[in-house]
Amino acid sequence: MKLDVISDNKIFRRIYGKGKSFVSPFLVSYFLPSNSGKIRYGITASKKVGGAVSRNRARRIIKEAFRLLAEEYSLAGSGTGCDVIFVARAKTAQIKMPVLKRALYKHLSEANIIKRP
């Protein structure tokens, strides 16, 4: 399963402006429904997160947690399209991946991308 990556700044700005956001101490998520039928995602980490090593770690664990959840709940084949942006916060680089995965699951279920059992 392949998830598409958003890299265009124009799309990021549109999602920030029109999307719905969810906040936790580790992560901010923005969701905007789309007609593409695909789930596209982008990850950002500002210098507030830390140096380059901390920012890269934060991006890596967000990416892996999202990949695991997408695989577990088969998000890419769900038929409904959505654009997602994850913004790392200062605590993101210090936490373990299962903790972030729980926060990410909560955001995805609140946005109705994952249906709770």
Image (cartoon, grey):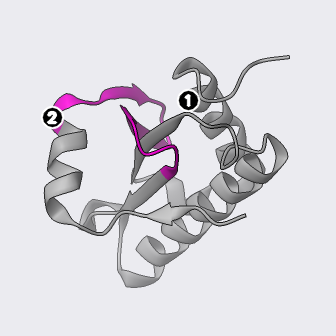
Which amino acid type is shown beneath numbered disc 2? Gly
Up the image or down, 20 lies above or below 41; here it is: above
Among all residues in the image, which is located at the extreme bottom? Answer: 53
Asked whether residue 96 appears in the rendered view, the answer is: no
| Residue at image coords 67%, 63% | 64
Rendered-image quadrant of the C terminus: top right
Q: Is label 1 in a helix, a strand or a loop?
A: helix
- Badge 1: how crowded within 10 Å, few (<14), some, or many (20+)? many
Q: Earlier in the sequence, mark 2 or mark 1?
A: 2
Report which residue position mark 1 lands on. Answer: 107
Instruction: Kindly indicate the quadrant of the structure image that contains residue 48.
Output: bottom left
State the image coordinates of residue 19 (x, y, percent, origin top left).
28, 30
Is residue 44 found left or right of 74 in the rendered image? Answer: left
Residue 6 falls within the magenta-colored stretch = no
Report which residue position mark 2 lands on. Answer: 17
Q: Which residue is at the front of the view, 29 or 32?
A: 32
| Residue at image coords 58%, 63% | 63
Residue 21 falls within the magenta-colored stretch = yes
State the image coordinates of residue 107 (x, y, percent, origin top left).
55, 29
State the image coordinates of residue 76 (x, y, percent, origin top left).
66, 49
- Badge 2: how crowded within 10 Å, few (<14), some, or many (20+)? few
| Residue at image coords 42%, 45% | 36
